[in-house]
């Protein structure tokens, strides 16, 4: 098994487990939908960049601040759930790719009309 295969599996596992943890453990303001859009783990499995999307987009900074303030607690819960060693350190990052994709789609829709 190559390192990239392992990294891909680790990314999927962390996204799945961390999404479940965030859903149960983190309180966001009513009317906010927060999603972990993707995870990119370093090849040495030391850190995982967890990309966070939010609807409405105007609340993204606040949602990110909430996650960052609880990162230690979330990391502890993730460490208990994963059997891999080392468990990568979580770093929450604002998702930009999905926002850019949505903007491109909006432009394409306008062009169709």
Image (spheres, helix red, strand yellow):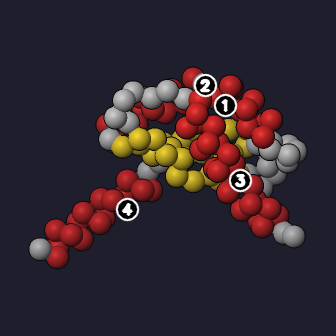
Residue under the point 49% across and 27% down:
27
Which comes sooner in the sequence, label 2 or label 3? 3
Residue under the point 67% across and 31% down:
74
Q: Residues within 10 Å of mark 3 (few under 14, many from 20)?
A: some
Residue under the point 36% across and 43% down:
55
Given the current orientation, which residue lies at the most extreme front position?
24
Given the current orientation, which residue lies at the most extreme left position?
113
Helix, strand, or loop for circle 4? helix
Q: CA distance from mark 2 to mark 4?
A: 29 Å
Q: Which residue is mark 1?
A: 74
Asked which quadrant contains residue 70, the reply is top right
Q: Which residue is mark 4?
A: 101
Which comes sooner in the sequence, label 3 or label 4? 3
Residue under the point 55% across and 37% down:
23
Q: Which residue is mark 3?
A: 13
Helix, strand, or loop for circle 2? loop
Residue placed most toward the observer, 61 or 66: 66
Q: CA distance from mark 2 to mark 3?
A: 20 Å
Q: Residues within 10 Å of mark 2 (few under 14, many from 20)?
A: few
Helix, strand, or loop for circle 3? helix
Left or right of residue 99, residue 73 in this image? right
Tally the numbered discs: 4
Closer to viewer: mark 2 or mark 4? 2
Q: CA distance from mark 3 to mark 4?
A: 25 Å
Q: Are marks 1 and 2 in contact (CB under 8 Å)?
A: yes
| Image quadrant containing the C terminus | bottom left
Closer to viewer: mark 3 or mark 4? 3
Which comes sooner in the sequence, label 1 or label 3? 3
Q: Percent x, y for residue 8? A: 71, 62
Q: Which residue is mark 2?
A: 70
Left or right of residue 43, residue 48 in this image? left
Left or right of residue 84, residue 100 in this image? left
């Amino acid at each position: 098994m190559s390192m990239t295969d392992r990294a891909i599996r680790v990314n999927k596992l962390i996204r799945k487990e961390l999404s479940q943890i965030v859903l149960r453990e983190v309180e966001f303001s009513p009317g906010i939908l927060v999603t972990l859009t993707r995870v990119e783990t370093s090849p040495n499995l030391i850190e995982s960049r967890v990309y966070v999307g939010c609807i409405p987009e105007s609340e993204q900074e606040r949602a990110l601040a909430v996650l960052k303030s609880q990162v230690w607690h979330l990391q502890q819960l993730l460490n208990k759930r994963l059997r891999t060693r080392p468990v990568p350190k979580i770093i929450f990052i604002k998702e930009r790719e999905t926002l850019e994709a949505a903007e491109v789609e909006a432009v394409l829709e306008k062009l169709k009309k």
